[in-house]
């Protein structure tokens, strides 16, 4: 009965965490636009952070609870799920996804570099303060580059303005532009909603980590096993929903760009911020299973991007590899 109780707490906490993060992001967008921040900048900053807010919140809570090994497992597990699960399902739904050249020339190298940096940092099985600073600076460089290159893309591609911009929930950008043209006032209910959702994020993140620790203790397994499997799938659900919806509407640049931005944020920020609070440990499961699959996932994604087409059979292959990954994490295979 005890383990069933904590499983229910885990599922409920993940659900509340994702929903509260979404509400917080929506209201943050409105505040940004009310303060006369251009919609483009709001898209590549506030919205991109909101996509991975559940991973960041749970990682910070994990550090405060002195379970630092959860952080690397969280980021790596989420990135593997984003590629194999999200892209895999999207390719199957779309049957064939076309990849824009701008994604190949700009975003694929950025994703590869971010992945290489985080693997280099993790290689000694720990992440210390100065490594966290380097990763965070890397993300700031990426954000600045995204803004500058994104403006060029908008000027070049008038037919699909901002369509292949990474690091955002891109289906919101058209709405953001409309709001920007008719700026809203900073109403009290927006501020209250932001504060309430922020409290919910903290509480749900706390109970998510607590339930993981309790379940791991009852089952006698490492917390990273649950984090890289169940939690990674749970926190990837927003990306999955956005990408599948985009793939169904043949807006492939959104389905793929959503994964780019989320993975780069996970690799550089979800790990760096907690590392600046306390040194992080990397356990054996994360290092021996997570790292090889992360490298494989990134390489496959890069090769699929270079071919400029991702077919449904490739999506099925992605899903099969993800099932193998879960079996390896759970010790079944």
Image (tube, rainbow, N blue to C red):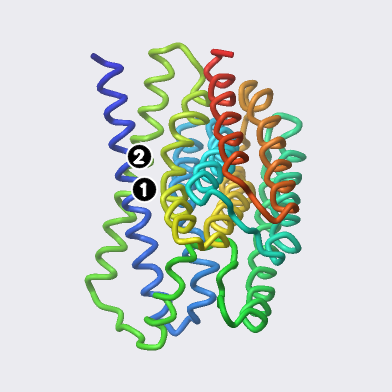
Instruction: Residue 246 in the image: state x and y as whole percent.
Output: 46, 58
| Residue labelled with disc 1 | 18
In this view, the residue in front, 230 or 323, is: 323
Identify the image quadrant of the C terminus: top right
> How far is mark 1 from mark 2, CA to CA?
6 Å
Mark 1 residue element: helix
Residue drawn at x 45%, y 51% is 244
Q: Residue furthest bottom?
A: 181
Asked if residue 250 can be seen in this view, the reply is yes
Badge 2 density bin: few <14, some 14–19, many ≥20, Cα 10 Å: many
Q: Marks 2 and 1: in contact by CB < 8 Å?
A: yes
Q: Which residue is mark 2?
A: 14
Residue 192 has which mark?
A: none
Q: Is residue 111 above or below residue 31?
A: above
Image quadrant where one finds the N terminus: top left
Percent from the top left, x then y, of residue 285?
Answer: 61, 22
């Amino acid at each position: 009965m005890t383990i069933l109780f904590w499983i229910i707490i885990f599922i409920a906490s993940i659900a509340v965490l994702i929903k509260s993060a979404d509400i917080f992001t929506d209201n943050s967008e409105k505040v940004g636009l009310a303060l006369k921040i251009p919609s483009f900048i709001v898209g590549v900053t506030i919205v991109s952070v909101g996509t991975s807010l559940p991973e960041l919140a749970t990682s910070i809570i994990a550090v405060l609870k002195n379970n630092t090994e959860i952080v690397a497992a969280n980021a790596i597990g989420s990135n593997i799920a984003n590629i194999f699960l999200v892209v895999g399902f999207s390719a199957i739904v779309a049957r064939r996804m076309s990849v824009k050249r701008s994604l190949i020339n700009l975003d694929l190298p950025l994703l590869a570099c971010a992945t290489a940096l985080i693997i280099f940092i993790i290689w000694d099985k720990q992440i210390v303060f100065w490594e966290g600073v380097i990763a965070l600076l890397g993300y700031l460089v990426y954000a600045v580059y995204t803004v500058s290159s994104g403006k060029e893309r908008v000027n070049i591609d008038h037919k699909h303005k901002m369509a292949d911009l990474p690091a955002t929930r891109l289906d919101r950008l058209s709405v953001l532009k409309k709001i920007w043209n008719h700026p809203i006032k900073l109403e009290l209910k927006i501020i209250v909603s932001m504060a309430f959702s922020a409290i919910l994020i903290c509480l749900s993140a706390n109970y998510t980590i607590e339930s993981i620790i309790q379940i791991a203790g009852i089952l006698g397994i490492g917390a990273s096993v649950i984090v890289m499997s169940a939690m990674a799938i749970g926190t990837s659900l927003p990306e999955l929903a956005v990408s599948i919806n985009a793939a169904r509407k043949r807006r492939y640049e959104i389905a793929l760009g959503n994964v780019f931005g989320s993975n780069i944020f996970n690799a550089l920020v979800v790990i760096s911020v907690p590392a600046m609070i306390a040194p992080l440990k990397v356990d054996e499961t994360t290092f021996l299973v997570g790292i090889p699959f992360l490298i494989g996932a990134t390489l496959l994604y890069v090769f699929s991007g270079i071919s400029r087409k991702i077919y449904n059979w490739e999506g099925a292959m992605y899903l099969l590899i993800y099932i193998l990954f879960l079996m390896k994490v759970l010790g079944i295979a």
